[in-house]
Image (tube, helix red, strand yellow):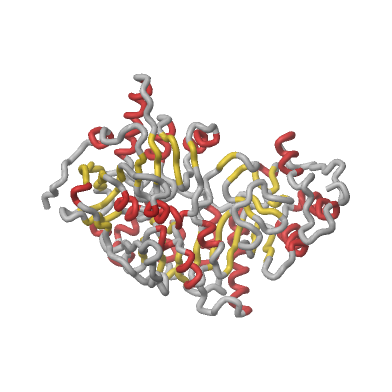
C-alpha cells in the first residue's frame, strides 16, 4: 500500500532536529529503540561542533536504549539533558563528568509527567515501527515504553520503519493511556493477560514528517553464563518462594512475578522454572527477557505481560518463527500500565529486583556507586517494590573481587527504604524482614546475607552503636565506604574513636 508520507534518508530526517530542541525516542531498553535517525543526529552534532557551532538536545525515552542512540549521542556530546533511565557507558561517563544533565525518574511516572507538561514541549518524536497506515496507525516493534504519550505530545513525528520486525507483530501490543486527573478512571487489568486498549498508536497523519526505512536488529546483548554465585542466589529466591507457597502465605496457584533486568534476574527465573515447589506461573513485569521465553517454551510460564521484549537476536528469531503462538502468550503495554502501582497491587505481583548494595536495616541502593557516581538509574524497580505482595532484593554479597561488601552499615545512596524492602537475598542466604524491628533486621541481614569476611566488622558496628530504635552512628555509618576510597578495599575497616557515646 502506498503511504502518503515522504521517504527520507536518515540524514534528511536528522536535519529536522535543531540545537536546543527536546526530542523523544521510542524504545524501552534497546528493544524498540530507533537506530538510523539517532546515529544521523549524532553525526549532525559532530559536524556542527567541528564548525564551532553548538548542538545539544534534550532526550526523553521510555527507559534505556541501544548504543546507536544513547551511545552515539553521548560520544558526539549531543545530549544537554536526559531522562528517565540509561545504561550506556558513554552516556554514564558524560553524566558523571557533568557534561550531560540527568534526572532519575520512576518509569511509571514519565508518561504522565509528559502529559502534564512538567518536562516542557517535545519538538519531535522518533519512533521505530514495523508498520504504519495512511490514517496514522503506528504498529510498534519490540517495545511500547512511553511511545503512545510521546507521539501524542510531540509537535512532529519521524518514523523508522524497520523491516527486521514483521508487520505481523500487530496484535501483540495493548495501547492504553489513562485520562488525566480529575477524570482518571480505574485501569481494568485484573489478570496479566487482560487487554484494555488497541493494538496500535494512533496519531494525526499530518504530524508525520516522513519515514526512514531500515532493516536493523535490536541491539540487545547476551547474558553471562551462570556462575556459582548467581546460581545460588537464584536457588535461594526460588526456595524462599516455594516455602511461602507451602506455608500458605502465598496462594497455592501462585502470583504474577516481576523480575528486573540482567544475569541475576535470568538466574532467578531459571531456578523458579526448575523448582518442583513452584507451579506454572505468569509474569507481570516491565522487561521480558530470554529466560521468560525459554520457560514459556518449556510450559513453565503460561503468560507474560511487559513493556518490552528485550531478548537476544537468537531468542527473538525463535519467537518470530512461532509468532502466532507467542501472540497468545505475550502482551506489550505502555510502561504507565505495566508499572502502574494500582495494577501491581491489585494483581499481587511479587517483585524481584537487584541492588547495588543493601544496608543492615533493609535500605537498598539501586543507582549510585559510593554515593556519588550514577550507574544506571532507578528504572521501574520502585514502581513494583512499593506496591508488591512481597518485595525481594538480591545481590552478590561482594563486588570487585571481594574488595566491596554489598552489605554495609548504611547505604551510600538510598533508592528503596526499609519501609518498602521485605526480603534481602545473597548467595549466602535469605533475610526475611517482615515484622522485624531495625535491630532484628540488622542481625538477620548480617548473619544470613553478609560475606563471612565482613560479618565481624558489621557485628562490631552494631556493638558500637547500641541504643536507639535504629542503632546508627552518624560518625561511622560510612566507614566501609571511606575505607574503600582510601585503600581500594573495604577489608580491614576501622571505626577509630567511634563509640556509643561519641556517635
* Figure check: 235 above or below 72: below
Between 53 and 38, the one lying in front of the other is: 53
Between 255 and 420, the one lying in front of the other is: 420
* Occupied quadrant, residue 382: bottom right
**Residue depicted at 56% across the width and 70% down the height:** 389
Side (left or right) of 260 relative to 75: right
Between 1 and 344, the one lying in front of the other is: 344
* Figure check: 195 above or below 30: below
Extreme residue in the front direction? 182
Extreme residue in the top direction? 51
**Observer able to see residue 399:** yes
**Observer able to see residue 316:** no
**Residue 497: % across, % down:** 87, 42
* Occupied quadrant, residue 388: bottom right
**Residue 342: % across, % down:** 47, 68
**Residue 300: % across, % down:** 46, 70
**Residue depicted at 51% across the width and 38% down the height:** 92
**Residue depicted at 35% across the width and 41% down the height:** 23
Count of picture labels:
0
**Residue 494: % across, % down:** 82, 42
Amino acid at each position: 500500500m502506498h503511504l502518503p508520507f515522504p521517504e527520507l534518508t536518515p540524514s534528511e530526517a536528522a536535519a529536522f532536529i535543531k540545537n536546543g530542541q527536546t526530542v523523544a525516542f521510542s524504545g524501552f531498553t534497546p528493544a524498540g529503540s530507533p537506530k538510523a535517525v539517532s546515529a544521523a543526529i549524532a553525526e549532525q552534532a559532530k559536524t556542527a561542533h567541528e564548525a564551532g557551532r553548538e548542538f545539544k538536545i534534550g532526550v526523553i525515552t521510555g527507559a534505556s536504549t541501544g548504543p546507536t542512540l544513547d551511545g552515539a549521542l553521548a560520544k558526539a556530546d549531543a545530549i544537554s539533558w536526559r531522562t528517565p533511565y540509561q545504561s550506556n557507558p558513554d552516556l554514564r561517563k558524560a553524566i558523571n563528568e557533568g557534561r550531560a544533565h540527568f534526572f532519575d525518574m520512576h518509569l511509571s511516572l514519565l508518561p504522565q509527567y509528559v502529559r502534564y507538561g512538567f518536562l516542557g514541549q517535545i519538538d519531535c518524536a522518533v519512533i521505530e515501527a514495523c508498520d504504519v497506515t495512511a490514517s496514522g496507525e503506528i504498529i510498534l516493534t519490540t517495545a511500547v515504553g512511553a511511545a503512545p504519550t510521546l507521539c501524542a505530545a510531540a509537535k512532529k513525528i519521524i518514523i523508522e520503519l524497520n523491516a527486521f520486525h514483521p508487520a505481523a507483530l500487530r496484535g501483540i501490543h495493548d495501547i492504553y493511556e489513562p485520562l488525566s486527573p480529575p477524570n482518571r478512571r480505574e485501569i481494568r487489568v485484573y489478570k496479566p493477560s487482560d487487554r484494555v486498549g488497541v493494538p496500535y498508536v494512533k496519531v494525526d497523519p499530518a504530524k508525520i514528517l516522513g519515514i526512514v526505512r531500515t532493516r536493523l536488529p535490536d541491539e540487545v546483548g547476551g547474558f553471562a553464563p551462570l556462575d556459582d554465585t548467581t546460581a545460588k542466589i537464584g536457588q535461594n529466591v526460588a526456595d524462599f518462594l516455594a516455602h511461602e507457597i507451602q506455608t500458605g502465605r502465598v496462594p497455592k496457584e501462585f502470583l504474577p512475578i516481576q523480575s528486573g533486568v540482567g544475569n541475576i534476574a535470568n538466574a532467578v527465573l531459571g531456578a523458579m522454572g526448575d523448582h518442583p515447589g513452584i507451579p506454572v506461573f505468569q509474569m507481570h513485569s516491565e522487561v521480558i527477557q530470554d529466560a521468560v521465553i525459554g520457560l514459556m517454551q518449556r510450559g513453565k510460564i503460561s503468560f507474560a505481560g511487559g513493556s518490552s521484549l528485550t531478548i537476544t537476536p537468537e531468542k527473538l528469531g525463535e519467537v518470530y518463527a512461532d509468532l502466532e503462538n507467542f501472540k497468545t502468550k505475550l502482551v506489550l503495554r505502555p510502561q504507565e500500565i505495566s508499572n502502574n502501582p494500582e495494577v501491581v497491587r491489585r494483581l499481587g505481583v511479587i517483585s524481584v529486583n537487584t541492588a547495588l548494595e543493601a544496608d543492615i536495616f533493609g535500605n537498598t541502593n539501586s543507582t549510585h556507586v559510593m554515593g556519588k557516581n550514577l550507574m544506571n538509574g532507578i528504572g521501574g524497580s520502585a514502581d513494583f517494590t512499593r506496591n508488591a505482595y512481597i518485595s525481594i532484593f538480591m545481590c552478590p554479597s561482594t563486588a570487585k573481587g571481594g574488595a566491596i561488601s554489598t552489605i554495609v552499615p548504611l547505604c551510600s545512596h538510598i533508592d528503596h527504604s526499609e519501609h518498602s524492602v521485605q526480603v534481602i537475598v545473597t548467595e549466602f542466604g535469605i533475610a526475611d524482614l517482615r515484622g522485624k524491628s531495625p535491630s532484628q533486621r540488622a542481625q538477620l541481614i548480617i548473619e544470613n546475607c553478609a560475606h563471612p569476611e565482613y560479618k565481624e566488622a558489621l557485628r562490631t558496628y552494631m556493638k558500637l552503636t547500641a541504643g536507639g530504635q535504629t542503632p546508627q552512628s552518624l560518625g561511622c555509618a560510612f566507614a566501609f565506604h571511606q575505607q574503600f576510597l582510601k585503600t581500594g578495599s573495604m577489608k580491614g575497616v576501622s571505626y577509630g574513636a567511634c563509640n556509643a557515646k561519641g556517635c
